Image: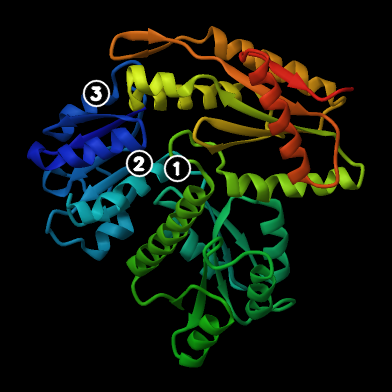
Amino acid sequence: MNILFVEDRTARLSSLIQRIESILGHDCHVFSSISAAQAFLVEPGSDVLAGVVSQRLCANVASPLGQLPTIVISDGLPVKANMLIKAENVLDYVMDYGQHNHFQIISLLRRAQFQGKIKILVVDNEQVVRNLFCNVLKKHGFHMLQAKNGIDALNMLAEHSEIRLVLTEMDMPGMSGEALIHAIREKTNKQELPIIGLADGENDQETLQFLRIGANDVITKPPRLLHEVIVRVMQNLAIAESFQEILELSRKDSLTGLFNRRHFYETAEKLFAQVRRGKINVAVAMIDIDNFKKVNDTLGHAAGDIAILDTGRILKGCLRDTDVVARFGGEEYCIMLAGLESTRDACLVMSRMVARVREHRMRFEGVEFSITVSCGVALHPMDSLEEMIKESDRLLLEAKAKGKDCLVCSDP
């Protein structure tokens, strides 16, 4: 995917583009005018995700690149309320290209991938109020849903798991806003699903009540300024997205993107509880790269990182969504294969994995190299997950002793 920049002062973009290409993996193209960017958009196979446009160069700041999701860099120029209200397909207005805004720009570009798919639910007894908020936010590419009371809202939340934000009033028939917020907070916290209260502008106590019972923010109803709705919605979504990114980073190994050891135990223990109830079959495999020190010593640690990364990709490619794979540390990986018809199937899967690693060729600084792995597979459920991991580790040592580049499964 490509990202377009419309900016005539290109020196300001180098560090931001470097971060975007490193973190998101998208190619960035810089144009000095809107017309040049638009010409690129109509080229066959341009495949553009979003645009980042300097407000100085926009003739139409409300929709600078037509239907393309766009971030507008205001560059010190005022962002007027009517600009926000009229804006269509503008993800947000950002002050400048400073490093302090890089995270916000990258988060907005991530959001562009889900343009039209991010769902927001507006809950209010009055149709005219619901329509007001929906019409304002729909222009910014959000998929808007409506509910007239708390009961309808809970049904809507159950039906649409993609809802990322809820706006609700307090006084509704059937189920009040307070009861709705309590019901939501029993299942999701403030970081997972932000709630913005729609408070009576003449009732300060209602504003305080919203915040006390679990709302993240409050907007008066009707809003004093329509652009306040956009700003507050954007800010609450950004905070929630940042939390999810931090949570995801805490679960993942930074090099391979696989689960880390801690999250493996958390996830695998839940699956193992189903084993105790006789509901599923599982196997646990321990994998280790053979002669890894030799790779580091002869080619360097960067080549070792390539070996670790490619092995992780091969493992992931051999598994199903129901399986759990983690980098346990160093050059060692652990897998729980779950939902097997027969535990012997795990030996077939891991045998294919060993062969694929053996056949895979890697390159580092013009040098081609390959690696092998050894694998131990514990097939029979034991009293605990820890025991199965220890057994697979023992079988891994057997595979090493047999000459490496092989797997050893527990006896049938």
Residue carrying label 1: 115
Q: Is residue 264 above or below residue 42?
A: below
Disc 2 versus disc 1: distance between alpha carbons?
7 Å
Nearer the observer, 63 or 55: 55
**Is label 1 in contact with label 3 (beta carbons under 8 Å)?**
no
Q: Name the outermost residue toward the front.
A: 401
**Kind of residue at disc 3:** Phe
**Kind of residue at disc 2:** Pro
Question: Which sits earlier in the primary sequence, circle 2 or circle 1?
Answer: 2
Disc 2 versus disc 3: distance between alpha carbons?
15 Å
| Residues packed near mark 1 inside 10 Å, few (<14), some (14 to 19) or many (20 plus) | many
Tell me if 275 is positioned left or right of 127 in this view.
right
**Kind of residue at disc 1:** Gln
Tell me if 47 is positioned left or right of 61 in this view.
right
| Residues packed near mark 2 inside 10 Å, few (<14), some (14 to 19) or many (20 plus) | many
Tell me if 223 is positioned left or right of 410 in this view.
left
**Is label 2 in contact with label 3 (beta carbons under 8 Å)?**
no
Dividing the picture into quadrants, the one containing residue 390 is top right
Q: Residue 40 carries which label?
A: 3
**Is label 2 in contact with label 1 (beta carbons under 8 Å)?**
yes
**Quadrant location, the C terminus:** top right
